[in-house]
Amino acid sequence: MALLEVEDLGVTFRGDREVRAVDGVSFTVDAGEVTGLVGESGCGKSVTSLALIGLLPKQNTRRVRVDGRALFDGLDLLRADTRTLRDIRGREIAMIFQDPLSSLNPVVPIGVQVAEVLVRHRGVSKAEAQRRAAQLLDRVGIPDPNRRLKEYPHQLSGGMRQRALIAMAVACRPRLLIADEPTTALDVTIQAQILELLKELVREDGTAMIMITHDLGVVAGLCDRVNVLYAGRVVESAARRPLFAEPVHPYTIGLLNSIPRLDAGQGARLTPIRGSVRDVLPWSQGCAFAPRCDRAVEECLAGPPEITGDPHSFRCVNPGVGVDLEEVR
Amino acid sequence: MTDLTPMLPAPEPRPAEPDSQTPTASLAGLTPKARRQRLDRLAELAAVHAEEKGRSLWAEAFRRLRRNPAAVAGTVVLLLFVLVALIGPLFVPYDPTSTAWADQVKEGQNIIPGPSAQHWFGLDHNGRDEFSRVIVGARQTLLVGVVATALGLIVGCLLGGLAGSAYGLGGRAGRRIDNVVMRVIDMLLAMPSLLLAVSIAALLGPSLTTVMIAIGVISVPVFARLLRGSMLAQANSEYVTAATALGVRRWRIALVHVLPNSLGPVLVQATLTLATAIIEAAALSFLGLGNPDPAVPEWGVMLTDALTRLEVAPRLTIYPAVGIIITAFGFTLLGEALREALDPKLRR
């Protein structure tokens, strides 16, 4: 059985007008597997992850409606009461955030912040927690951990801060790790180190991970299975290899084409996707990507396209060339 | 070793030390004084490195404070004031309540003896030594200022902290608690502070305790609003989300994470409130709501007494007034400097 089974997850924000930020998103995460959620800014990746652990601002109020199911080991996270969720957070499911500086409390030493997770979920004494915190910092590759424990976030470098956050997240060996663009705020050399570290940690602990990113390079290096999101819906879902080798959805193809290539020769122009995320059609009227799509046909506007295919599924009525549709279906 | 560049002191205008830019440049060919300055500068830079381990934002703020002349001036004034208030009464030349020289004062003929070698500030209208009274009066002023501010700070922070953490972290029930607490605070805030203080003082009868309570009460809503607002701002910050995502308990988030980050503005307000508390205490005493015992010297009471004799002996109003002004000024200087030191926008 899958560790996490998300079915028809939907998130609606009700302000002056209703915004359906996430709509009918379904995916599964198996134990020990890395699942990628990929898409541009505003496609609903972060909202999805926050909804899963009940951390959307004003979640469960009239302003934010969450529907669907998210079964974590049989428990529906979207219906669980806050007390249960609080026990799960940090122990069973942990999250790593994008900006390591603002995710750490500036006036509390690193050691206290790492140790408090252990005190909370493992019930160990403060001294013992500090000892284990030092081990954790060592494990995530922070040199001289005993000194670092006493330091404050602003005294650490960006990469070091992200390592500290990762140490906090893996402190209780959670079964699921949600990483929300963990490398976006870091420079490129550090990014690679952090990804290596995450890879190593999930392999050693057998932790499943949801990797949220807009960076297909991260996906290529880390994810077992990839879900491409557009305007709040999954538009293509496949294992890593087929997704990169035979992308089907025009959006995925566009994303792959817009990556700069070293072998393209000097002066070669990038091929971006036309328009911006704002040129979106409501899914109810047709394919949201149609206004930006090169392969758009009249049928695209006939109504919401269904997601088809297994295990390589996609949501498109006129899928990309070079794909044997018979084999996919 | 850590990367030290961000830890170096922020570049400051130091026109007096043009050579501070390159402390390690050749020392030869310099006057001994310039050489000493340069070495001091070098030592200063090196010291920053050595102490860098485990320095909190508060320690950072303290370091910035030490380099701010206004803060140093304010601190010196305050230390002097506190010193005078604490040990001054032990060294005064005469008993401040003794009217031993009453025969020299002839109010009918408008004669109140001025400063002399014997009585540095002269005598007051009852023939008491004015210098001794000013010194001993400082103690009352300090007592009122500190106790009233502490009272306002403690009650205000309890209420504001309760409302802030309830609203920020407590969900729907928390918002209700916040609503009740803050509406009461708003009612207090809506009343003119001096009027409120006068009403309280009138209700409890004139005494020094009354003055402290009255001034404490009028500063409660300010502290409460300030701490609540500051906590609400922090409650939306990412580290709170991150801590919540790790399952940290709400009371711990409120106390360990949100509160320490919210105290800066409250602390600044406390210093400024000390200044206004002293002025307001004087005002209440001036209005006759302070200590009813005229023998005990208090700057506000001394002002009232001196006012009716302004034409005869204006100096009697000047001594306590200057005392009040200097003290309030010292607290204000320190408070402003503290605000600057803690202001994240001015950091580095």
Image (cartoon, rainbow, N blue to C red):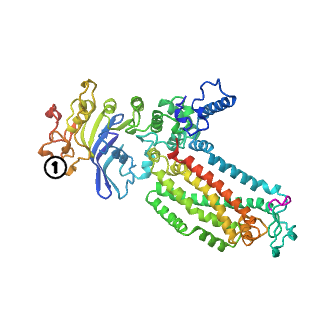
Q: Nearer the viewer, residue A208 or B59?
A: B59
- The verdict on residue B176 being magenta is no
Q: Residue furthest left?
A: A298
A281 to B148, vertically: above or below: above
Q: Position of residue A263 (x, y in %)?
A: 26, 23
Q: Nearer the viewer, residue A51 or B7?
A: B7
The image quarter containing residue A3 is top left
Q: Nearer the viewer, residue B77 or A86?
A: B77
- The verdict on residue B118 being magenta is yes
Q: Which residue corresponds to the image point at 28% horizontal and 30% vertical from the top-left?
A: A260
Q: Position of residue B117 (x, y in %)?
A: 85, 58
Residue A112 visible in rendering: yes
Picture mark count? 1
Q: Position of residue A106 (x, y in %)?
A: 52, 43
Q: In the figure, is residue A29 to the left or right of B105?
A: left
Residue at the spot of label 1 = A303
Quadrant into which the N terminus of chain B falls = top right
The image quarter containing residue A248 is top left
Q: In the figure, is residue A325 to the left or right of A110?
A: left
Q: Residue furthest bottom?
A: B108
Q: Which residue corresponds to the image point at 35% horizontal and 36% vertical from the top-left?
A: A31
A115 to B259, vertically: above or below: above
Chain for disc number 1: A
At label 1, counting other C-alpha atoms closer than 10 Å, the crowd grade (few under 14, some 14-19, many 20 or more) is few
Q: In the figure, is residue B287 to the left or right of A113?
A: right
- Chain part drawn in magenta: B116-121
B134 to A197, vertically: above or below: below
Q: Which residue corresponds to the image point at 69% horizontal and 52% vertical from the top-left?
A: B78
Q: Nearer the viewer, residue B37 or B94?
A: B37
B11 to B190, vertically: above or below: above
Is the stretch drawn in magenta largely helix, strand or loop? loop
Q: Position of residue B140 (x, y in %)?
A: 73, 61
